Amino acid sequence: HLSGLGVLMYFREASLRDLVILSPVDFVVNPYALIVCNFEIHMEPQHKAARRLHPREFTQLKSKGIADRKLLHALWEGFGNTAELEALAVKFGIMVPLLGGGMEEGEGAQYLVPSILSQEALPSPVQQVRYVGYLVMADRDTLRLDWGGCVTARVVQRQGFMPMGIFSRLTIKSVTLWQRVLGSGSQGAGADVSWLRAHEAQIHLGAHAFRLSLDSDLGCIKVQILVGNTLSIVQALREICGKVLQECAGGLACGIGIPSEGGRMDGIDAGLGL
């Protein structure tokens, strides 16, 4: 498509700036299809070979969506350029580094593959929900000027905007921060990911705990604060969301909306105080 338009994509990163891709299907689509797939249906020869070499890591990819670097190298051995494939996958959000930068973690680097996380809902929170809010996104002028201090759910649905992949990026940055707060090593990644689903996540930051869930109909993210200081969690979420938007949608801004019904969003005309 880009070739037909006479458009050339160039990346300035040291790991990509000398790379020339003439056939994207052969270079990136086929390798990535080995990790972004339904393993119950698709079992290619590369899968079988990698499973024999790294059975534990292969099971971890299937069950938790965690891709270990040595497993990736085994899956992609026939394609070559594994370092470049890793870098491109991270750049476009196909894989997200765990624990603050898998690219620097050597052979033990791990990545989360958000698109293959379980669709099953998380179990209900054990703790009582202390606070409910909604993380809303829109262009800066809409959020600051048009919405002002209060907006209805109907307006958020009509004027708000949530980029593809925003939830997984927000979740992973939250998990990375969680692991840094705990000072956990790579062995803690499995326990963290067990709290992640495709559209839900429960995050712990020291004494704080909160749950995120995607509301795709409304176009926002529900935030349930379970334990800890509400203001600290809201500030952390604003910072994390701001960083994510800066990476993938620089023209957007985020805000936390508080339902006027005291935590419920009953109907499209419900109000949100920003």
Image (cartoon, helix red, strand yellow):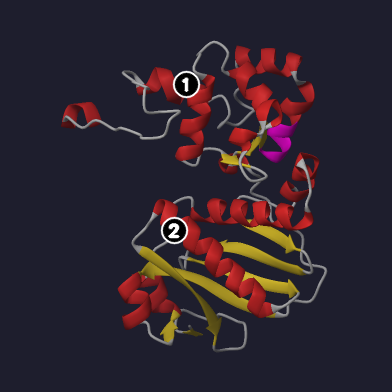
**x and y percentages locating residue 110 in the rendered image:** 67, 35
176 or 24, nearer to the observer? 176
For residue 98, above or below residue 126:
above
194 or 101, nearer to the observer? 101
> Dividing the picture into quarters, in which one does residue 61 lie?
top right
Give the quadrant of the N terminus: top left
Question: For the residue marked with disc 1, what is the amino acid?
Answer: Asn
Give the dominant element type of the magenta stretch: helix, strand or loop.
helix
> Mark on residue 245?
2
Instruction: Count the labels in the image.
Output: 2
Dot 2 or dot 1: first in sequence order is: 1
Side (left or right) of 247 relative to 48: left
Question: For the residue marked with disc 2, what is the amino acid?
Answer: Leu
**x and y percentages locating residue 265 in the rendered image:** 55, 80
Q: Name the residue: 62% across, 24% down.
A: 72
**x and y percentages locating residue 99 in the rendered image:** 67, 45
> Dividing the picture into quarters, in which one does residue 202 lie?
bottom right
> Mark on residue 30?
1
> Dividing the picture into quarters, in which one does residue 11 lie?
top left
Q: Tell me the crowding category of disc 1: few under 14, some 14 to 19, or many 20 or more residues within 10 angstroms, Cα based.
A: few
For residue 96, above or below residue 154:
above
Disc 2 or disc 1, which is closer to the eye? 2
Q: Cβ–Cβ below 8 Å for labels 2 and 1? A: no
161 or 176, nearer to the observer? 176
Residue 135 can be seen, yes or no: yes
**x and y percentages locating residue 121 in the rendered image:** 69, 56
For residue 110, above or below residue 70:
below
Q: Which residues are magenta?
A: 60-65
Residue 216 can be seen, yes or no: no
- Does 62 appear in magenta? yes
Side (left or right) of 156 relative to 123: left
> Dot 2: what SS?
helix
